Image (cartoon, rainbow, N blue to C red):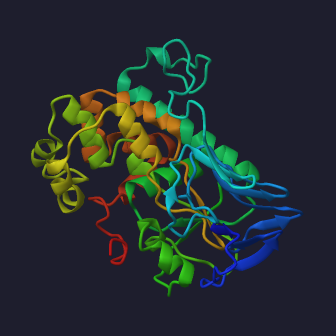
Amino acid sequence: MNFLITNDHSYQNDLSLNEIYHKDFKILFDDHWIHKNNSLVKGLTNNYCSIKFGDTIELSHNEIRDFPLWYNDSTVSNFTKLKNYVPVDGTLNFDQKWHLSYQNNFYDKSKSCGCGRSTTDRCIGWHSYDEEPFAVALIKKILIDNTKAFLKENKLDILVPNNNGLDTLTVRSVLDYLKVDYQLFDIQKLDYINLQAKLQKDYYGFNQIQEFSSPKCIATGFYGDEYILRNPFYVQHILKNRGIDLVQVFDAKPDCYMKNFFDLVYKEKCNQLTSVSVDKLTQMICNDIQVWHINNTMLFTPFKDKRLLKLLECSNSVIVNQVTDGKLSKMVIEHLNKDLLPLLDTSKNSNDPHWFWQ
């Protein structure tokens, strides 16, 4: 789902992308777009992009855009950095020049019932739940809803990485609960083509996926850490504002699931962190972009859903148990397919391929 639109006639197609022309514009794009009449479309229910070109050019995408967006006077792209960066709530359209607009009320809390717990404006009986069961019910419902919506449109073979990380197993448990056919596969370190080689320099997710010669869809655990309280850097903002030091919390839990990864990746960052408000943290999470479709490799990312950010309001104990040991995630797996729990790695990323974090 990579594209570049330009009326700069000197721009060179150095990545050997597909190329079409419309009026004064050159449009470059990777494989597996649907080109019909004056439009290009690619993606899935929660991760898509549409480009319509006539007298104007209209870009549209899902509410939480899964790819970055840059522009200057002559060019728009999601894989080449340009003068201006567009935040996730921004949209671009061309009418004589590129116009930037913003979605109204993008960061407002989603509709809910009177008790504030439902994912819609109708009560679904969660008001009587204790906090931990409510958090589990919220995660389950959103993942199941997103997966059902994806299944209605998906026509591709579904693959799941054969690893035993918490987020991947959570996604597998949802697929198993819905009795979805999928195939496990071992990610191979193939020679990156030009586009993937370019993208993986700035977005680690492209170093953790594999390109395929024919269209496939990978169901992934990307964004699980960020949206369900397992990214220590984000969680530290919440806890620090409540007078809790996450570094000290981890020091007191030497055997927890996240301990080794926290010490390796997050401890120093959390020690130096200056906390921000929950509103600012919400913006940071929504603007955290990791990976998106590339050529024949399509990605289903069920965790990327603003409704899950209701979890930022959880109590200290629920947050601490989730960020250190993935308790909520484990409970979701237990409810949906408990047979997967014995497969879980003893610590986060302990059995990842060696190149994942290079």
Quick one: quadrant of the N terminus? bottom right
Compared to residue 207, the image places residue 150 above or below, namely above
Q: Please name whichever residue, 242 or 23, is drawn nearer the observer in this view of the structure.
A: 23
Determine the image quadrant of residue 200.
bottom left
Q: Position of residue 283 (x, y in %)?
A: 43, 40
Q: What residue lies at 25% left-to-right and 53% top-to-bottom?
A: 258
Q: Is residue 315 visible?
A: yes
Q: Please name whichever residue, 309 or 200, is drawn nearer the observer in this view of the structure.
A: 200
Q: What residue lies at 86% left-to-right and 64% top-to-bottom?
A: 36
Q: Is residue 227 visible?
A: no
Q: Please name whichever residue, 118 or 18, is drawn nearer the observer in this view of the structure.
A: 18
Could you tell whether 99 is left or right of 174 in the image? right
Count of number-bearing discs: 0
Q: Please name whichever residue, 250 or 39, is drawn nearer the observer in this view of the structure.
A: 39
Q: What residue lies at 64% left-to-right and 47% top-to-bottom?
A: 62
Q: Position of residue 229 (x, y in %)?
A: 35, 41
- Residue farthest to the right, as pictured: 37
